[in-house]
Image (spheres, rainbow, N blue to C red):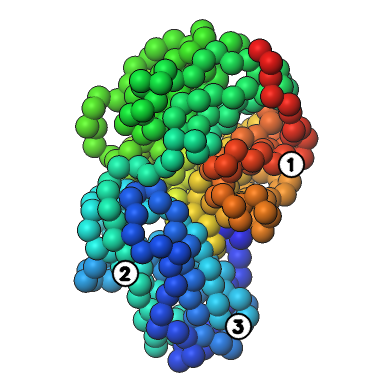
Amino acid sequence: MATVTALSLALAACGGPTASPKLALSRASGAVGTVVQVSGKAGGGCSTASAWHGFRIQPAGASSSGQLIAMTPAVATDGTWTASFAVPAYLGSASGAVPVSPGRYEIVAHACKGKVRAVASFRVTSSSLAVTPRTSVAMAVTSDAGGYWVVQADGHVSAFGDARSYGSLPAQVARTATIVGIARTYDNRGYWLAASDGHVYHFGDASDHGSLPAGAPGGPVVGFAATPTGHGYWLLDAKGTVHGFGDAHVQGQPPTSQAPYSAIAARPGGGYMVVGAFNAATYLFPGDVHEGGGPGTALSGAVSGIASTASGNGAWVAGLDGGVMTVGDAAFHGSASGTAAVSKSSLTAIAATPDGQGYWLLTGSGTITAFGDARMLARSKG
């Protein structure tokens, strides 16, 4: 995702015939969740007057008319573009979300004048979420912003500042669980860990409000958020279905045609927001408000996280490439795009300070970067 401060970006209208019919991929196979870099050349003679329609992912040999555009990265003046995405568990289509199963897929891009079609083949090896056990996947912030917790995919929790550790997943559980989210209790004396299979683990004074049953449809769970009261939580699956537990009421669902979705955040005054992985389509509930994003939004890195503003009427949307976009009343405080941290490991999460004047960015290698009034904190001894 390019570093931008709004949801729109002028893209290039390129020359068409000078486009390359070849796309370059960082890898040609992998499981759902595998991060892939793709690059191409849309053609020379670019201007900044209109949008280029990006690239999409579709089953090999499928008709192009049935699939929604996946991502729309910005095009440089020489016609080149680069983007990062995670292999999705679902593909959006006009008729709804289509599950991704192991097999052959195509990455397809057109020059904006439609004269060159560039294709690269990709093999999906597994529909199970791919992540290494030591990948840092999520963080939660204490109510006074004086501490935070970072959790790895294997359920190991590290505490910083005034945050205290209340335990990690036992080794026997960590071998099979893939953690995707963490949320704290109201009083900071506990937290929940959510796994991709929908199971929720509780620590400290966190109460068990339930988990998804095994084999629930909708693909892997990709997002997790607790209610402001701490008496419930939501799980978001890749298809875009929101599941509520405890006092976390389901107050609306985003359209499956915009799948896959990648993150959910609680709104401080109640309700939640969800964001699409490939187009940053951001929906606020209750109210079913489409706050921003959608097909054609400029992204050079698929969305990996979202954080709500203090009002709940805006959000920061973070991409795999370290870029940060603002939605609604969110103010831009900086990004990690182009830094050494994201060149070594993709961005996995964003967390905001309670007053909304800053945020932290987390990479898979555990690197944390602070912006605005967010502070870098030492590891806790407690």
Q: Nearer the viewer, mark 3 or mark 2?
A: 2
Marks 2 and 1, how far apart at CA: 39 Å
Left or right: residue 180 versus residue 90 is right
Q: Residue at x 61, y 35 (%)?
A: 351
Are the residues tagged 1 and 3 within 8 Å (C-beta)? no
Residue 59 placement: quadrant:
bottom left
Vertically, is 118 above or below 252? below
Would you name the residue on which mark 3 appears?
78
Percent from the top left, x then y, of residue 156?
Answer: 50, 25
* Numbered mark located on residue 358 in the image: none
Would you name the residue on which mark 2 appears?
121
Closer to the camera in the image, 346 or 228: 346
Percent from the top left, x then y, of residue 223?
Answer: 44, 35
Vertically, is 42 above or below 171? below
Would you name the residue on which mark 1 appears?
371
Which residue is farthest bottom? 17
Which mark is first along the chain, 2 or 3? Answer: 3
Vertically, is 310 above or below 17? above
Percent from the top left, x then y, of residue 55?
Answer: 41, 69
Residue 123 placement: quadrant:
bottom left
Q: Is residue 172 visible?
A: yes
